[in-house]
Amino acid sequence: MYSLTDLDNVEPHELEQEAPTLLPVGLELQPEEMRPSVWQYEKGEENAYHRQNEQEELYVVLEGTVDVTIERDDERDVVALSTHDFLVVPPESWRQLRAVEESTVLVIGAPNEKDDSILPE
């Protein structure tokens, strides 16, 4: 009927070549249509510069401040997000998050595609 968890019950997952800590909420909840994760950043940490093959991504800053660099078709923008800000990035846009301060970000990708990330060659 529904799935429920809290962050205290989600085992952190350290990713190779990724600075932030990943809390794979989706592994606990097993949603069919979306892929939720929580990223915990120390000040100055950033994730890999990437885009998605199919997923659009929703970013919700739960606490802290992050700068999100977004690039598409020779246009580049840096968006400053702070606690309770929301941002949606389409799959074809390149993006990277960098923590201005210690931060926690909820990331929801849809559709639920495993290993959908594309890194620059």
Image (cartoon, rainbow, N blue to C red):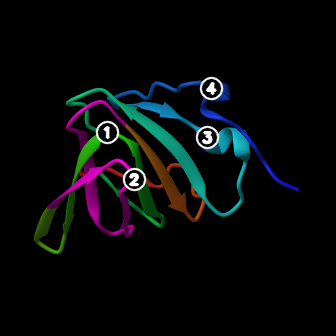
The amino acid type of the residue labelled 2 equals: His
Task: Tell me the residue that label 1 is attached to.
Answer: 64
- Measure the C-alpha gap from mark 3 to mark 4: 11 Å
Asked if the residue at tag 3 contacts the one at tag 2, i.e. Cβ–Cβ closer than 8 Å, the answer is no
Residue found at x 14% / y 64%: 77
Q: Earlier in the sequence, mark 3 or mark 4?
A: 4
Comparing 97 with 54, the one in front is 97
Residue found at x 37% / y 70%: 90
Q: Is residue 42 above or below residue 119?
A: above
Characterize the magenta stretch by its predominant secondary structure.
strand
Task: Tell me the residue that label 4 is attached to.
Answer: 8
Q: Residue 94 colored magenta?
A: yes
Q: Earlier in the sequence, mark 1 or mark 4?
A: 4
Q: Residues within 10 Å of mark 2 (few under 14, many from 20)?
A: few
Q: Quadrant of residue 31?
A: bottom right
Mark drawn on residue 25: 3
Q: Write the start and end of the magenta stretch as one range.
A: 78-103
Q: Residues within 10 Å of mark 1 (few under 14, many from 20)?
A: many
Q: Residues within 10 Å of mark 4 (few under 14, many from 20)?
A: few
Q: In the orientation shown, which residue stands out farthest toward the bottom? A: 73
Q: Earlier in the sequence, mark 2 or mark 4?
A: 4
Residue 38: % across, % down: 49, 40
Task: Tell me the residue that label 2 is attached to.
Answer: 84
